[in-house]
Image (spheres, grey):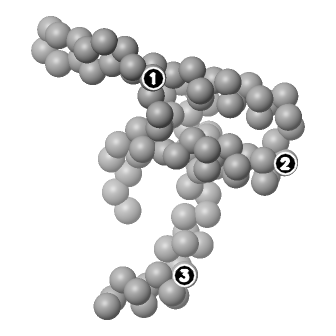
């Protein structure tokens, strides 16, 4: 599995739903939702930088909670990859 750029492509709503399913308390869930909904990003190339735009997907890199959220997001990946229906579909 190639995880290059993985933090940038996470579907945040899916992660929030997983946190709800895991029983994360409402105050923590609210904090995470607010945190993830207020992210802005810009592109830097050589000495130029773009204007800031709201980021729709992904977790910010360098933030302490991001690896934990990412691990929660992918915690069922092995179940999906081991699903016989997926394996049989991929072969044909």
Crowd rating for badge 2 (residues with CA inside 10 Å; few <14, some 14–19, many 20+):
few
**Residue pictured at 85% horizontal, 34% vertical:** 26
> Quick check: marks 3 and 2 in contact, CB under 8 Å?
no
In the displayed structure image, the side of residue 83 where residue 41 appears, left or right: left
**Residue pictured at 33% horizontal, 18% vertical:** 42
- Give the residue number, with chain letter if any, for mark 3: 83
Query: Is residue 70 at all visible to an observer of this figure?
Result: yes
Residue reaching furthest to the top: 47
Q: Is residue 72 above or below residue 63?
A: below
- Give the residue number, with chain letter if any, for mark 1: 54
> Any mark on residue 23, and which?
2
**Residue pictured at 69% horizontal, 30% vertical:** 32
- Quadrant location of the C terminus? bottom left
- Image x and y of residue 65, in percent: 61, 30
Crowd rating for badge 3 (residues with CA inside 10 Å; few <14, some 14–19, many 20+):
few
Give me the C-alpha separation between circle 3 and circle 1.
36 Å
């Amino acid at each position: 599995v190639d995880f290059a750029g993985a933090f940038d492509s996470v579907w945040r709503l899916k992660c929030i739903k997983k946190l709800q399913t895991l029983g994360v308390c409402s105050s923590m869930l609210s904090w995470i939702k607010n945190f993830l909904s207020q992210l802005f990003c810009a592109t830097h190339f050589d000495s130029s930088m773009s204007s800031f735009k709201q980021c729709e997907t992904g977790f910010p890199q360098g933030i302490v909670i991001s690896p934990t959220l990412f691990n929660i997001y992918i915690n069922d990946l092995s179940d999906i990859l081991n699903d016989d229906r997926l394996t049989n579909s991929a072969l044909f």
